[in-house]
Amino acid sequence: MSDLPKNASQFELVDGVFVGLAGAIFVGAAMLQRSLGDVVGDEARLPPAAGAKTRREISRSKRFLNGPPPNLPKK
């Protein structure tokens, strides 16, 4: 112990705080991940037409946002 600096116990305390913080973040992330449930299984149970319907809706929204307003007289 004589070859350690005088403030070595301070560094050990700071290291402990960082390790505890990292552990808390890890546990929190694991809990959030677990709360999502089985996402892959839920997606697998979707009907096959769900993807096509989504693509149609996206296409419609793009046409709505990018196209000219319908039924308006041209100047």
Image (cartoon, grey):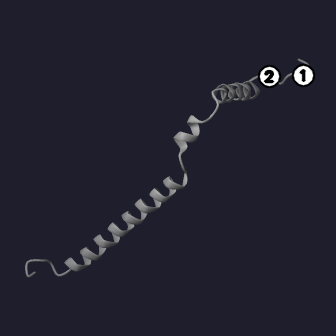
Q: Which residue is the site of mark 1?
A: 72
The three-letter code of the residue at mark 1 reads: Leu
Q: Residue at x 79, y 22 (%)?
A: 68
The three-letter code of the residue at mark 2 reads: Pro
Residue 18 on image: x %, y %: 34, 68
Nearest the eye: 14 or 23: 23
Q: Residue at x 51, y 56 (%)?
A: 32
Q: Are circles 1 and 2 on residues that touch, CB within 8 Å?
A: yes
Nearest the eye: 25 or 72: 25
Q: What residue occupies the far top of the structure in this picture?
A: 74
Q: Is residue 10 above or below residue 71?
A: below
Residue 61 on image: x %, y %: 73, 29
Nearest the eye: 30 or 24: 30
Q: Gap in Å between the C-alphas at discs 1 and 2?
A: 9 Å
- Classed neighbour count for the residue bearing mark 2: other residues with Cα under 10 Å, few (<14), some (14–19), many (≥20): few
Q: Which residue is the site of mark 2?
A: 68
**Label 1: element kind:** loop
Q: Is residue 45 left or right of residue 23?
A: right
